[in-house]
Image (cartoon, coloured by chain):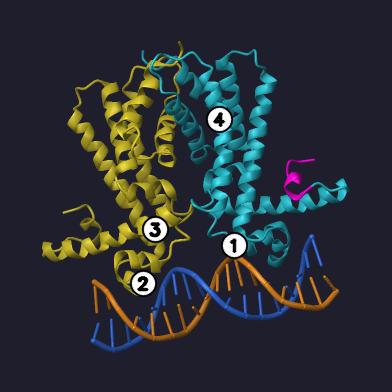
Chain colours: A yellow, B cyan, C orange, D blue
Amino acid sequence: MTGLSQTTGISRRPAAAARRNNRKLALMKAAAECFVANGFAASTMREIAARAGMQPGSIYYHFPSKKDLLAAVHEEGLRMITGATRATLSRVGATASPWARLEAAAAAHMEMLLEGGVFFQALMRELPPPGSPHHAEVTARRDAYEAIFSNLLGALELPAGTDLRTLRLMLLGAMNWAHSWYRPGGDRPADIAAKFIRNLREGLEG
Amino acid sequence: MTGLSQTTGISRRPAAAARRNNRKLALMKAAAECFVANGFAASTMREIAARAGMQPGSIYYHFPSKKDLLAAVHEEGLRMITGATRATLSRVGATASPWARLEAAAAAHMEMLLEGGVFFQALMRELPPPGSPHHAEVTARRDAYEAIFSNLLGALELPAGTDLRTLRLMLLGAMNWAHSWYRPGGDRPADIAAKFIRNLREGLEG
DNA sequence: GTCTATACTTGGATAGAC
DNA sequence: GTCTATCCAAGTATAGAC
């Protein structure tokens, strides 16, 4: 049972519910692929439908509009990356050193973002438009995710005068921007994360 | 005489050329505003024209298509930020310390990106689509700009084993991502740049 | 749940006057 | 150089059969 079933209500017939959600999820995946490739506005319901193997009109049984499809993609991506990072942290354990926990979370973040699939690339590409009802929802969920990193950074012993907020935005910015230059075949996502953390931790002054 | 006149040929009547270029520049600015606010695909020639105070059909005297308008915005923005950062570096002087030069360039970069106007915001928003003729052009120009930072980082004395490329991408990522969270009224762009550089330079380990 | 067919809207681009 | 008028393509969403 995925988190998705919670959005459509719980069925007393799990098999049927799973099949329904699979179709819906396939549709979201097809939409995410289009959004990543062409951006939201340039993506067409026709192409999304084609990728999902259905006719354009059929989409509207599952989602009332294209906007809702975008919001669903974002919600699912954020739900998944939040789950993955939290899972990594509980695997590492609360007794690990703060730096080790930060590095593990950064590695999980990069791994999802860069190799986790289209949902995460879609997160980086385009938010629902500011002012729209979906924007607030997605932003709130994103803030909640980023709070994980606030806590991890807050647990470090830092030099006096370090601006924690700027530090968090610096690290997340460096990581998130990687989606624009990362290509498989070079450093693994976890390697990149480790280098980022190392640069920050040890400093560069000779 | 702006760099722009070079794109339309040099006139023997500077005043007329300047007036022509002013209209063209106003059009590019109007387009940049739309692209920043709504993204490329959702921006309409009608709205761009309205912002520039002309009729939709008139745009096509200056630009053959919407795509070319996007490319022109990117080229102008990149030309301006390259000029600004280079100017800052020559003002600082070649004899300044490598760290001081890096910090000055970072401050100039942030100042332009965050407070320089719509052209720079447009740079962050959307590239011409991969594979298009304009994409290669813009990417080459961007790479040339980023090489400034390669050189500045290369001039530092860094710990053995530091990956220069990753370091450059980390710093540029952190800076460029700031466009998504920066709001006037808090730290000035140069302050943010200084904090980033300080975090990197001194390290965070207690 | 998915299909076919289509209504309706929006928008890029052009033609030709001024 | 700019305007008016318009063509035509593309796209969201709906209606109703199956």
Could you tell which of marks 4 and 1 lies nearer the N-terminus? 1
Q: Mark 1 is on which residue type?
A: Thr
Asked whether the beta carbons under mark 4 and mark 3 sit within 8 Å of each other, the answer is no
Nearer the observer, disc 3 or disc 1?
A: 3
**The C terminus of chain B lies in which quarter of the figure?**
top left
Using the rendered image of the protein, determine whether residue A194 is visible from the camera's viewpoint. Answer: yes
Identify the subunit bearing mark 3: A
- Residue A24 is drawn in which quadrant? bottom left
Q: Is residue A206 above or below residue A63?
A: above
Are labels 2 and 4 on one chain?
A: no
- Residue B114 is drawn in which quadrant? top right
**Range of magenta residues:** B1-9
Q: Could you say where residue B134 lies in the image, as x and y percent from the top left? A: 57, 50
Q: Is residue A155 above or below residue B138?
A: above
Q: Residue at x 19, y 22 (%)?
A: A95
Q: Mark 4 Cα within 10 Å, few/some/many (few <14, many 20+)?
A: few
Residue B152 is a magenta residue: no
Are labels 3 and 1 on one chain?
A: no
Asked whether the beta carbons under mark 4 and mark 1 sit within 8 Å of each other, the answer is no
Q: Residue at x 55, y 32 (%)?
A: B146
**Image check: D1 left or right of A149?**
right
Residue B4 is a magenta residue: yes
Whole-Å distance between the Cαs marked 2 and 4? Answer: 46 Å
Whole-Å distance between the Cαs marked 3 and 1? Answer: 21 Å
Q: Which mark is residue A56?
A: 2
Say which element carries label 3.
helix
Q: Mark 4 is on which residue type?
A: Ala
Q: Mark 2 is on which residue type?
A: Pro
Asked whether the beta carbons under mark 1 and mark 2 sit within 8 Å of each other, the answer is no
Q: Which residue is mark 1?
A: B44
**Image check: B91 left or right of A132?**
right
